[in-house]
């Protein structure tokens, strides 16, 4: 995704969610998104066996009325 496409993507989502969408804020969010995507891409390249780290089972707290 190009920087312009990413900016438009973040801007469209902010508008859809009724979030503040001034250009400076959108640019900051797009920058964070781009960094996060770059980190995820690096992690995807690491060859780890599935059993190296067992994910914990999520058990939400039971709420009783």
Image (cartoon, grey):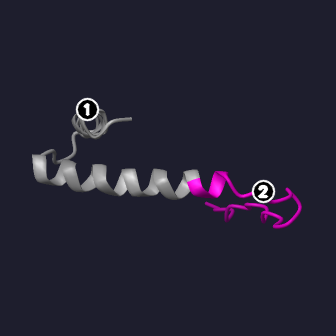
What residue sits right under mark 2 in the picture?
47
Q: Which mark is residue 46?
A: none
Residue 15 pos. (x, y %): 21, 35
Tag 2's secondary structure? loop
* Residue at 30% from the left image edge and 36% from the top image edge: 13
Q: Quadrant of residue 65?
A: bottom right
Q: Main secondary structure of the magenta part?
A: loop
Residue in front for this viewpoint, 27 or 56: 27
Q: Examine the rendered structure and indicate whether residue 35 appears above or below residue 2.
A: below
Q: Residue furthest right?
A: 51
In the image, taking residue 28 as reference, residue 60 lies left or right, namely: right
In the image, taking residue 18 as reference, residue 2 lies left or right, namely: right
Residue in front for this viewpoint, 36 or 64: 36
Extent of the magenta region: 42-65
What residue sits right under mark 1 in the picture?
12
Q: Nearer the viewer, mark 1 or mark 2?
A: 2
Residue 62 pos. (x, y %): 69, 62
In the image, taking residue 27 as reference, residue 52 lies left or right, namely: right
Circle 1/circle 2 CB separation < 8 Å: no
Q: Residues within 10 Å of mark 2 (few under 14, many from 20)?
A: few
Residue 1 pos. (x, y %): 39, 35
**Residue 64 colored in magenta in the image:** yes
Residue 2 pos. (x, y %): 33, 36
Q: Examine the rendered structure and indicate whether residue 12 appears above or below residue 31.
A: above
Q: Quadrant of residue 10?
A: top left
């Amino acid at each position: 995704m190009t920087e312009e496409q990413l900016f438009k993507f973040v801007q469209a989502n902010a508008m859809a969610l009724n979030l503040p969408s001034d250009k400076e804020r959108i640019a900051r969010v797009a920058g964070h998104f781009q960094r996060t995507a770059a980190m995820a891409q690096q992690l995807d390249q690491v060859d780890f066996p599935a059993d190296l780290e067992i994910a914990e089972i999520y058990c939400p707290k039971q709420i009783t009325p």
